[in-house]
DNA sequence: ACTTTCTTTTACGTAAAAGTCAATTTTTTC
DNA sequence: GAAAAAATTGACTTTTACGTAAAAGAAAGT
């Protein structure tokens, strides 16, 4: 485990710009250390960035991503808090289930297209 | 099967605004008929709207959604075309696979959170 | 016919999520 | 310790995906 990552190391690893990481910091999604004014990212930050980008790929907004991250941070002690948390988890799970269904549906349609293509290819080979 | 849907029927069914549907028309994603200047949507359009919204939920851009739709429209005859098409299908499939993986990963993390919550709840019941 | 409710076009506005540019530090390297 | 390379901040711009408002043309109920 390394101690710190520089900003450019991470931009290269994840294919994002420094502006993007700075933006995520402004949004409170990550809190890199500072040495003077220079940002020093720990592996916790690196992991968070991974999660942010995952959320982004899934079409979650920054706000939604923040919600998810706050869930991870989360389980404090109190009972009411815990119930709230579990409600949130259930909501996110539902959103993800919807997305998964959307993916299955889309894949199914692509399967059809693929089959149609293959059928047409077969016809061509026989010589329509 | 009904012949036509009005724009507001569809906005209500899908929970989108008229502006949104007109925007999709401007973008060439749907092509409703016209009686005079009034739009008349057929079930083909209705189906396309479903697909557009599915893509939207998955975080695809309009451009990407258009690509998918054009794939569906597609299999013309020619060989080169078919190969291109199958390449595109493969690409979309890869994107969807990535998203699916992202979903599984996120769900796994939510499972952890859930377990942590349950464990803490159990502690509380015993009386920490 | 009259009012109400829809619908259309045109055009400007906006929020989210960065990109870009410029002007400084800061850090690194020789 | 000076020059080069990397990082920072702040401001402005851009793109996407619509929102909103205005003005006017149809449709439908009464």
Image (cartoon, coloured by chain):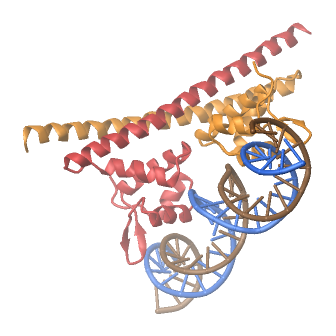
Chain colours: A red, B orange, C blue, D brown
Q: Which of B123 and C1 is in front in this view?
A: C1
Viewed as shown, does residue A123 lie left or right of C27? right
Q: Residue furthest left?
A: B127
Q: Which of B17 and A51 is in front in this view?
A: B17
Q: Which of A4 and A124 is in front in this view?
A: A124
**Residue A7 percent across, percent down from the top left:** 47, 64
Viewed as shown, does residue B92 lie left or right of A71? right
Viewed as shown, does residue A42 lie left or right of C20? left
In the depicted structure, whether residue A9 falls above or below residue A84: below
Q: Which residue is drawn at 37% across and 43% down?
A: A88
In the depicted structure, whether residue A41 falls above or below residue B115: below
Q: Can the viewer see residue A112 in this picture?
A: yes
Q: Can the viewer see residue B109 in this picture?
A: no
Q: How many marks?
A: 0
**Residue A44 percent across, percent down from the top left:** 35, 54
In the depicted structure, whether residue C9 falls above or below residue C15: above
Q: Residue at x 24, y 40 (%)?
A: B116
Q: Which residue is drawn at 43% across and 73% down?
A: A38
Quadrant including the C terminus of chain A? top right
Q: Residue furthest top?
A: A126
**Residue B30 percent across, percent down from the top left:** 79, 36
Viewed as shown, does residue A29 lie left or right of A1? right
**Residue A12 percent across, percent down from the top left:** 54, 56
Query: For residue B8, which quarter of the picture?
Result: top right
């Amino acid at each position: 485990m390394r101690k710190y990552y520089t900003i450019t190391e991470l931009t290269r690893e994840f294919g994002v710009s420094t502006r993007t990481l700075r933006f995520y910091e402004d949004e409170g999604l990550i809190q890199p250390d500072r040495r003077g004014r220079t940002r020093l990212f720990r592996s916790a930050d690196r992991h968070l960035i991974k999660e942010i980008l995952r959320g982004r790929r899934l079409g979650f907004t920054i706000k939604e991503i923040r919600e998810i991250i706050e869930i991870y941070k989360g389980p404090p002690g109190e009972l009411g808090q815990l119930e709230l948390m579990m409600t949130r988890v259930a909501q996110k799970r539902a959103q993800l289930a919807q997305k998964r269904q959307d993916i299955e549906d889309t894949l199914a349609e692509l399967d059809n297209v693929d089959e149609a293509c293959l059928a047409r290819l077969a016809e061509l080979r026989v010589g329509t």
